């Protein structure tokens, strides 16, 4: 269930880790108010990190995009799944190891910076690593698949099944990982969220003893926070909406929830459970004939808190997600990226 904070939650943390798309920007547009709020965090001396599963771009290229949309950032603020994959490979195979590369420039640069030798020829390679790359050819995928089947260790930068594009959600790198792993009959090592390597790499590189993860996706950002046992804040400016939250099992549930990034600077009360349902801040939520019903008035944030609390209690006790198909949250309309 959601946890309580009687003070603004940012005050309890010295490292704030931000997902990018759906949290900082959507496509090529910064989300309203985000740039100023990130600067506010920096102004208190806290560490800020931008964490991305995208392995195709270098940290400097990611920082350049952030600056382009009005968010101050340097390459050292960005940690990618490519860097996490490179560390996994360096720790397993040592400096100078030849690593067969299936991916883009971001992954190649990460391997070189970790002291590894990225190669396109499998001769002498001790492992293969893959990451999203729009120019990866099918013949290269076939070759890697057979090598993995024959025993070459396989590290994947991430396993995201979708990727946001200008024309909507498209197949992500996880589709490629699934293809190779399924053909080869192996389980690859995955470096990106929600697995531990990228989360641990972020803390290691950026610093801080009390991190919090801020994200918009339950199955990467929030589950990734659970993987290293740190708190998380879910913001509703990206892909997650009420139906996804209603079906969220404990490992996918955030510590805190807020419609926007403003929630970092606010206390987070928790609903009171009554015999009939839950209550908070003028809102009451109950289960009526298998459906979520919320009545009253109050803040948008408190509406979400009572709604998800009822949904999760129902899921835990009944074993099935509550019907929210005819429930309309208050405030702005459902984000364009929400599924």
Image (cartoon, rainbow, N blue to C red):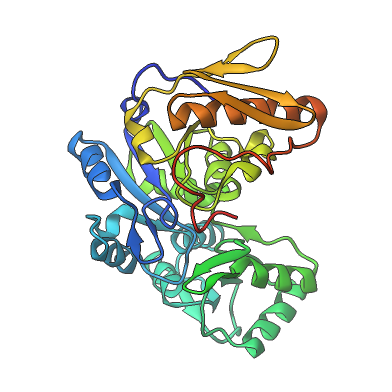
Q: Residue at x 57, y 37 (%)?
A: 226
Identify the residue at the far left of this view.
43
Question: Could you tell me which residue is drawn at 48 percent across and 26 percent down?
Answer: 302
Quadrant of the drawing holding the N terminus: top right
Q: Position of residue 146 (x, y in %)?
A: 74, 80
Give the total of numbered labels: 0
On screen, residue 92 above or below 113: above
Spot occupied by residue 335 in the image (x, y as percentages of width and height): 49, 53
Rendered view: 302 above or below 178: above
Residue 162 in the image: above or below residue 328: below
In this rendered view, identify the residue nearer to me: 199 or 162. 162
Q: Is residue 56 above or below residue 238?
A: below
71 left or right, relative to 239: left
Dividing the picture into quadrants, the one containing residue 57 is bottom left
**Residue at 51% across / 74% down in the picture?**
167
The percent position of residue 132, horizontal first and vertical second, equals 53, 72
Expressed as whole percent of the image width and height from the top left, the position of residue 103 reads 52, 76
Q: Quadrant of the C terminus?
A: bottom right
The extreme bottom residue here reads 139
Is residue 201 visible to the viewer in this orientation of the structure? yes
Residue nearest the observer in this picture, 39 or 276: 276
What is the quadrant of residue 16 in the picture? top left
Q: Is residue 131 visible?
A: no
Residue at far top of view: 275
Depth check, front residue: 240 or 79: 240
């Amino acid at each position: 269930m959601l946890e309580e904070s009687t003070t603004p939650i940012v005050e309890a943390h010295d490292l704030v880790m931000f997902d990018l798309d759906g949290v900082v920007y959507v496509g090529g547009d910064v989300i309203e108010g985000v740039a100023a709020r990130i600067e506010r965090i920096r102004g208190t001396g806290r560490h800020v990190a931008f964490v991305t599963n995208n392995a195709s771009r270098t940290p400097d290229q990611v920082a350049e995009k952030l600056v382009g949309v009005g968010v101050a950032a340097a390459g050292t603020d960005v940690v990618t799944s490519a860097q996490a994959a490179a560390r996994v490979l360096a720790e397993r195979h040592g400096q100078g190891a030849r690593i067969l590369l299936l991916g883009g420039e971001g992954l190649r640069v990460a391997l070189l910076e970790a002291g590894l030798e990225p190669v396109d020829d499998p001769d002498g390679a001790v492992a293969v690593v893959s990451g999203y790359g729009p120019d990866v050819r099918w013949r290269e995928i076939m070759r890697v698949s057979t090598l993995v089947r024959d025993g070459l260790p396989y590290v994947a930068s991430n396993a995201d099944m979708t990727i946001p594009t200008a024309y909507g959600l498209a197949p992500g790198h996880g589709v490629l990982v699934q293809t190779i792993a399924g053909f080869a009959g192996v389980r690859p090592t995955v470096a990106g969220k929600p697995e531990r390597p990228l989360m641990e790499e972020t803390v290691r590189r950026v610093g801080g003893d009390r991190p919090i993860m801020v994200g918009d996706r339950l199955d990467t950002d929030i589950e990734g926070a659970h993987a290293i046992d740190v708190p998380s804040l879910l913001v509703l400016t990206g892909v997650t909406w009420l139906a996804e939250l209603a079906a969220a099992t404990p490992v996918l549930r955030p510590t805190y929830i807020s419609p926007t990034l403003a929630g970092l600077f606010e206390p987070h009360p928790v609903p009171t459970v009554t015999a009939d349902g839950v209550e908070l801040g003028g809102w009451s939520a109950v289960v009526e004939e298998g459906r979520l019903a919320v009545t009253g008035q109050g803040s948008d944030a408190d509406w979400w808190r009572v709604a998800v609390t009822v949904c999760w209690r129902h899921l835990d006790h009944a074993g099935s997600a509550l019907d929210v198909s005819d429930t309309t949250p208050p405030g702005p309309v459902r984000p364009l990226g929400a599924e």
